[in-house]
Image: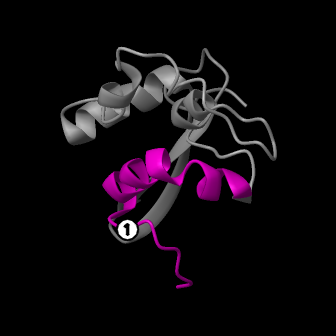
Amino acid sequence: MLCENCDQAQATGYIEETKNGIKRRINLCSRCVLEKQKAIFGVNMFSGLLNTPTTSLIKKRCTACNTFLDTIINTLFAGCPNCYVELAPHLNPLIINLHGTATHREV
């Protein structure tokens, strides 16, 4: 599926937008996701994590599915449920920034 914003790159993530009470999912490429973040939050909320002086943080991966932390950050998709447990110290601050909480609850 192509990015619904630029129609050029492959969509690797999405944002959900609510206008007039109607929720809509917009599939985006990683570049457009970063642009939307900057437009919404004024900054790239992941820049502090990705600009760390050491690459050891980015090379962290889930032992169950082998998904790298930087892949989860760039695509906004975890590889499996274990990613949330194993990479919690790094993902929870990002999840809280996006959703206001890192605790899942049924609605």
Model colouring:
one colour
In this orientation, which residue lies closer to the viewer: 33 or 55? 55
Q: Taking 21 as reference, is 82 above or below it? A: above
- Label count reads 1
Q: What residue is at 71 percent from the left and 56 percent from the top?
A: 82
Which contiguous range is marked in magenta?
82-107
Quadrant for the N terminus in the image: top right
Residue 31 coordinates in the image, percent (x, y): 47, 20
Residue 86 coordinates in the image, percent (x, y): 63, 52
- SS at mark 1? loop
Q: What residue would you read off at disc 1? A: 101
The image quadrant of residue 51 is top left
In this orientation, which residue lies closer to the viewer: 44 or 59? 59
- Kindly give the residue lying farthest to the right in the view shown: 65
- Kindly give the residue lying farthest to the bottom in the view shown: 107
Q: What residue is at 62 percent from the left and 29 percent from the top?
A: 71
Residue 48 coordinates in the image, percent (x, y): 30, 28
Left or right placement of residue 40 versus residue 23 in this view: left
Magenta stretch: residue 63 in it?
Answer: no
Magenta stretch: residue 100 in it?
Answer: yes
Residue 103 coordinates in the image, percent (x, y): 47, 73
Left or right placement of residue 30 versus residue 48 in this view: right
Q: What residue is at 52 percent from the left and 85 percent from the top?
A: 107
Left or right placement of residue 31 versus residue 79 in this view: left
Most frequent secondary structure within the magenta stretch: helix
| Amino acid on which the number 1 mark rests in the picture | Thr
Assess disc 1: are there few (<14), some (14-19) or many (≥20) residues with their C-alpha within 10 Å of its C-alpha. few
